[in-house]
Image (spheres, rainbow, N blue to C red):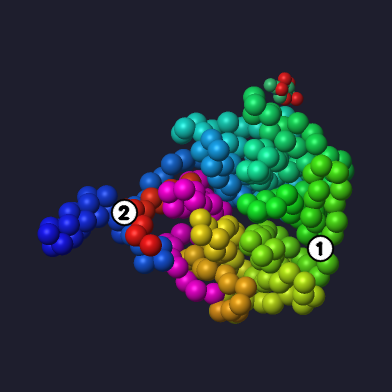
C-alpha cells in the first residue's frame, strides 16, 4: 500500500514538473504575469487573492538624470489594474482592518472599492516602503530621503521614528517586533526589539539581498540573487531554503496554501507546493 501511494506521489510530481525545492518540499512553477518592467514590492492579500506590486520602468531606473518612473498595480484573476490616481511606490495589507494601504511620494493612501487611492495622512512624506505585520495595529514605513523607519499610527495620523536604523531600503517585521531590513543596499541586518545596535547577517554577498517577506509560519525570508534564505533573530548565519536561477526583485507568500510569489525582470512567478504538507 505504501509503495502504491509513493508511486502515485512520484507520478504526480513528474506530471507537474515539481523540480523546484523550497525547504525540502517540491514545488511547480508558473509564470502568472508577463509585463514590461521590473515588478517589485509584491504583497498578497488573503482577503481577495489580489497580488499587489510596484512596476519600475527600467529605462528610467538606469538614467541618473531623471526620476525613476514607477506605478502601483493589482494583479487580480489574471488581469492587471493600475492604480492611476496616485504616484504609488509600495503597498501593505492590513488584515485586521481589512484595508490596503498605498504609499506615495506625497503621503499615505487607502485603496477604495473601485481600486482608487484615497488620501489618509502623512502629507508631504515620500514613503518608499511599507510593511504591515499580521499582529498588532502598527504600520512600518521607510521615508525618503532619510531612509529611516517610522511606525505609523493610522488612527491618530502620527508617526514615530525607530531609532538606530538610518539606512533602510526594504524591511520585514516578525511577530516579536524584530525589524529585518537591508541597509544602504548592501547589508542585511536585524534590529532586535529593545536593542540599540543592529546585527548584520553573515554569508550573504554585499548587494545581493533584494526583498523580504514573512511566510505562513512566521519565518522571515530574504530573497537574494542566489536564492531564498531564512533570517532568524537568534542566528547571524541565514539558512538557505531555495536555489534560484534568476535575480529576484520581489517576494510574497500566500500563507493559506503555502504558495510563493517571486518576481524578476518582466515576469511574476507563482510556485505551488506539489503535495499538501504533512507537518
Ligand atoms: C474611490 O475614489 C475615487 C477617487 O477619489 C472616487 O472618485 C470614487 O468615487 C471612490 N469610490 C467609492 C466607491 O468610494
For the point 27% across and 50% down, the residue is 16
Residue 70 % position (x, y): 67, 42
- First to last magenta residue range: 238-267
Front residue (pair 153, 86): 153
Quarter of the rendered image showing ligand 1:
top right
Q: Circle 1 is placed at which residue position?
A: 162
For the point 21% across and 56% down, the residue is 9
| For residue 129, side relative to residue 23 (left or right) | right
The image quadrant where one finds the N terminus is bottom left
Task: Look at the image and say whether residue 251 sits in the magenta stretch.
Answer: yes
Residue 263 % position (x, y): 51, 51
Q: Image height check: is 232 above or below 146?
A: below
Numbered label attached to residue 275: 2
Report if the CB atoms under discs 2 and 1 are less than 8 Å apart: no
| For residue 200, side relative to residue 266 (left or right) | right
**How many marks are shown on the rendered structure?**
2
Q: Disc 2 or 1, which lies upstream in sequence?
A: 1
Front residue (pair 216, 79): 216
The answer to whether residue 71 is seen in the rendering is no
Assign the magenta stretch its main secondary structure.
strand
Residue 152 % position (x, y): 80, 50
Q: Secondary structure at mark 2?
A: loop
The image quadrant where one finds the C terminus is bottom left
Q: Image height check: is 236 above or below 117?
A: below
| For residue 93, side relative to residue 161 (left or right) | left
Mark 2, other Cα within 10 Å: few <14 / some 14–19 / many ≥20: few
Q: Image height check: is 271 above or below 117?
A: below
Residue 25 % position (x, y): 35, 62
Q: For residue 69, what is the image quadrant?
A: top right
For the point 47% across and 48% down, the residue is 256
Amino acid at each position: 500500500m505504501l509503495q502504491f501511494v509513493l508511486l502515485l506521489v512520484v507520478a504526480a510530481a513528474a506530471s507537474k514538473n515539481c523540480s523546484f525545492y523550497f525547504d525540502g518540499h517540491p514545488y511547480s512553477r508558473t509564470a502568472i504575469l508577463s509585463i514590461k518592467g521590473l515588478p517589485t514590492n509584491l504583497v498578497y492579500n488573503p482577503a481577495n487573492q489580489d497580488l499587489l506590486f510596484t512596476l519600475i520602468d527600467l529605462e528610467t531606473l538606469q538614467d541618473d538624470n531623471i526620476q525613476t518612473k514607477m506605478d502601483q498595480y493589482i494583479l487580480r484573476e489574471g488581469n492587471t489594474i493600475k492604480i492611476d490616481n496616485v504616484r504609488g511606490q509600495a503597498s501593505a495589507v492590513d488584515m485586521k482592518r481589512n484595508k490596503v494601504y498605498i504609499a506615495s511620494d506625497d503621503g499615505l493612501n487607502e485603496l477604495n472599492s473601485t481600486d482608487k487611492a484615497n488620501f489618509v495622512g502623512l502629507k508631504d512624506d515620500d514613503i518608499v516602503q511599507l510593511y504591515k505585520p499580521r499582529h498588532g495595529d502598527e504600520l512600518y514605513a521607510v521615508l525618503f530621503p532619510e531612509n529611516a523607519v517610522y511606525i505609523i499610527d493610522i488612527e491618530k495620523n502620527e508617526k514615530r521614528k525607530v531609532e538606530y536604523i538610518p539606512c533602510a531600503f526594504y524591511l520585514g517585521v516578525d511577530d516579536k517586533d524584530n525589524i529585518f531590513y537591508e541597509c544602504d543596499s548592501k547589508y542585511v541586518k536585524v534590529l532586535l526589539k529593545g536593542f540599540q545596535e543592529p546585527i548584520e547577517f553573515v554569508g550573504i554577498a554585499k548587494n545581493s539581498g533584494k526583498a523580504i517577506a514573512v511566510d505562513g509560519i512566521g519565518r522571515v525570508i530574504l530573497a537574494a540573487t542566489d536564492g531564498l534564505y531564512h533570517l532568524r533573530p537568534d542566528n547571524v548565519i541565514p539558512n538557505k531554503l531555495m536555489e534560484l536561477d534568476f535575480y529576484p526583485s520581489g517576494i510574497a507568500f500566500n500563507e493559506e496554501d503555502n504558495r510563493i510569489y517571486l518576481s524578476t525582470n518582466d515576469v511574476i512567478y507563482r510556485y505551488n507546493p506539489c503535495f499538501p504538507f504533512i507537518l
